[in-house]
Image (cartoon, helix red, strand yellow):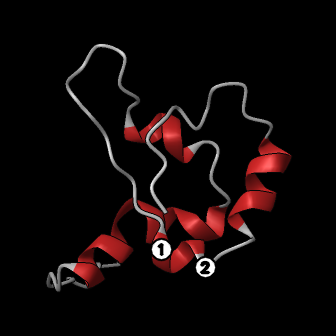
């Protein structure tokens, strides 16, 4: 799924969450940006509207798996 418009524009959080539940968003959705354009959204802005369980997959894990990038374990 590619959403090439501002997903936040007039977004009703409940409607967005319903949409995300209709497909495996944790495996198919990745954050993208057109930074450094002046009207681009920063990652923290986009993270505010995602359900907590999708933050890690959408913001980095799905891309790491798709591109077969090594993932380091965090030090606690």
Give the percent coordinates (x, y) of residue 60. Answer: 34, 66
Q: Residues within 10 Å of mark 2 (few under 14, many from 20)?
A: few
Rendered position, 41 above or below 2: above
Left or right, residue 68 beside residue 2: left
Quadrant location of residue 26? bottom right
Q: Dot 1 corresponds to which residue?
A: 28
Residues 70 and 1: in front is 1
Give the percent coordinates (x, y) of residue 72. Answer: 20, 83
Tag on residue 41?
none
Q: Residue at coordinates 53% horizontally, 47% vertically from top-left?
A: 47
Q: Residues within 10 Å of mark 1 (few under 14, many from 20)?
A: some
Q: How many marks?
A: 2
Rendered position, 51 above or below 23: above
What is the CA distance from the residue labelled 2 to the residue labelled 1? 6 Å
Give the percent coordinates (x, y) of residue 13. Answer: 78, 43
Left or right, residue 39 beside residue 65: right
Quadrant location of residue 38? top left
Tag on residue 24?
2
Give the percent coordinates (x, y) of residue 56. Answer: 46, 68
Q: Residue at coordinates 81% horizontally, 60% vertically from top-left?
A: 18
Residues 12 and 60: in front is 12
| Helix, strand or loop for disc 2 | loop
Rendered position, 54 above or below 7: below
Left or right, residue 63 beside residue 23: left
| Helix, strand or loop for disc 1 | helix
Quadrant location of residue 30? bottom left
Quadrant of the image for the C terminus?
A: bottom left
Q: Residue at coordinates 29% horizontally, 78% vertically from top-left?
A: 74
CB under 8 Å between callouts 2 and 1?
A: yes
Q: Residue at coordinates 33% horizontally, 48% vertically from top-left?
A: 32
Left or right, residue 43 beside residue 19: left
Q: Name, please, the residue furthest toward the top.
A: 38
């Amino acid at each position: 799924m590619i959403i090439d418009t501002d997903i936040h524009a007039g977004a009703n959080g409940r409607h967005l969450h319903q949409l995300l539940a209709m497909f495996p968003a944790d495996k198919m959705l990745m954050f993208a940006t057109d930074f450094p354009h002046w009207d681009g959204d920063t990652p923290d802005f986009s993270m505010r509207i995602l359900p907590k369980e999708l933050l890690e997959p959408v913001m980095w894990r799905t891309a790491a798996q798709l591109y077969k990038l090594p993932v380091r374990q965090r030090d606690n």
